[in-house]
Image (cartoon, rainbow, N blue to C red):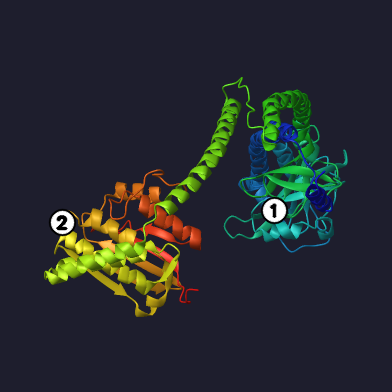
Amino acid sequence: MPIHHRIKHTANSSKVQPARINLRSKMFMTLAIIATVPLLLGVITIYIAYINSAEQSARAYSHQIMEQMNIHLNRSIYDYAKLTTVALYDTNVMEILRNHSGPYQSSIYTSAAEKSKMNLFISSLSFEKPEIVGIRILAMDGSIFGSADEKQSDHWLYEEHPWLKRVVAEDGEFVIIPPYEINYYSIRKARVFSVARLLREPYTLRPLAVATIDINSSLIFGNLESVTFSKNSKLLITNHNGDIFYPNKAVDFTLPADLRDNGLIDLQGETYLSVLRESSDETLNIIGLIPVSDLRKNAQVLFEYTLLISVIALLIAYLLAYFGARNLIKPIKHLQFKMKKIQIGLFGERIEIRSKDEIGDLMNGFNSMVTEIERLIKENLEIGLREREAELSALQSQMNPHFLYNTLENINMMALEQSHFEISGVVSSLGKLIRYTVNNKVMFVPLNEELRFLEAYMKICATRIGAGLIWRMHVDPILKTSIIPKLIIQPLVENAVQHGIRQQPGCIDLNIYQEDGTLYIAVSDDGVGMSAEKKLELIQRIGLPANPQQGKKESFGGPIKGNALWNVNQRIKLLYGPQFGLFIDQDSDIGSRFMIQLPVRLEEIE
């Protein structure tokens, strides 16, 4: 192994190299990801959509059932509330209640006739209403009237009826009393809730009694046991204070105070979807609690089946991706093998093209590239030989410049002797141009030397064109000592003469100034100008990385065809970088305007 190869290998081996993943593995992983991600997203989307659909269906079904329950419940409550007012329309009952409307007494006498009339009246109210356990009327003086099966008591006590003050405070509106245990009926002990109302004298509004209807919770709510929204759902009926009317048995959880419709709550470690329906008089609430796990049970089964099918599909997709990547990489591996041969100088290698797809185009491009490289190497060798021959020929045929200067000087003297001062001026300007251009050893010159060269050039142009050519220069005096590339402005001026004002009289302006360390050289004319399409075409030609007219030479003073402008732009970019160069003003309405941008250099030329 050569010494420099060993040194390079040793230096590289000291660095930790990243793991190399071949193209086939990358392609396989890419295809696998392309197959996996959309499939997983689809499975998750289906799962979420199914859950949302199940929740919406459960909400809709629950609201529908609860609406029917609410209508039935409201109708029943209002029927019971109306029963509490029937006593106001019976004269015998009203007469008895007026007799017992005095102050409350711990013991009071009630006649047998009064009891008989009241029992008959109360029994008629509960006829064929098995859910009504009993109806009682509590007179203001402490007397109590009830149905026949009630245990007889002389009077009622406040401590036995803690809800009585609330009924009196409602001032005649009916009140629903939460469920409680009663034992004042002789037949059975029952759990009831009551509808109560304060009865007043219709004309004097004097309180007469409190009528209560005790309703068996099991009978009125018994049919609700068959109502289910899901396997483990719960149905509750409460008031605004949170007292539970249904179910009849005690519950082992507490509802949150901020319970809302279509919300999620946690009870005993389980998440429930709450469905809430309030009665029209805002006295009772119907609450449905549906476990989220019930809603997602079917979705879970669907998800498991879908996931199983997806896994099988992915395995098949991975196998297809593996063999597909293998077949796709095979021609690329062959191309890589041929490229390694080119690296060691075997330019005669070619690839047999067997496909007409992008891989085939790549192989065709490789063959073309190798052919072109082989041609360029041969051409470069030939050009080198020809350049040496041309240099030798130029040295052999080189003419002494002093002979040309002396000849021009003699012509100048002859013109002066004949008083042809204009010819003398042209010859003198031509001599200055030749002296300036012959010296090829100088690449950079002060700006004032370039300006003197331009003045001599414009004198010759004025002689050729006539009085129609106007030449103006506006130069910052500080910049006259700045250093610029030699012969960098003349092509722009020549372009303005040839294309701007050659066909008609006009003016050429040269403006040189600086801003923020950048030297701006602007050459403009008021001639025929260019169309927007022509400007765009010229900008593209000037900005090309390769000479747009390679092989075509432009003689000094000959027509400008874009080659000189391309040379100017390339010289500047090679010398100063891509941020500088030649630019065309696309906004100029009259004539054309070209701008050179260079860095300001005020140092002396070495």
* Residue located at (19% from left, 55% from top): 502
Q: Quadrant of residue 515?
A: bottom left
Give residue 534's mark.
none
Q: Quadrant of residue 72?
A: top right
Q: Mark 1: which amino acid? A: Leu
Q: Is residue 54 visible?
A: no
> Residue 87, image x and y in percent?
66, 47
Up the image or down, 343 lies above or below 424; here it is above
Name the residue tied to disc 2. 504
Q: Nearer the viewer, residue 603 or 594?
A: 603
Distance from label 1 to label 2 (Cα)? 128 Å
> Residue 439, image x and y in percent?
40, 64
Marks 1/2 in contact by CB < 8 Å: the verdict is no
Residue occupying the far top of the picture: 354
428 to the left or right of 238: left
Name the residue tied to disc 1. 97
Instruction: Please report whichever mark, 1 or 2, sits nearer to the chain's N-terminal start.
Output: 1
> Residue 141, image x and y in percent?
75, 59
Q: Nearer the viewer, residue 550 or 324?
A: 550
* Residue located at (59% from left, 33% from top): 370
514 to the left or right of 369: left
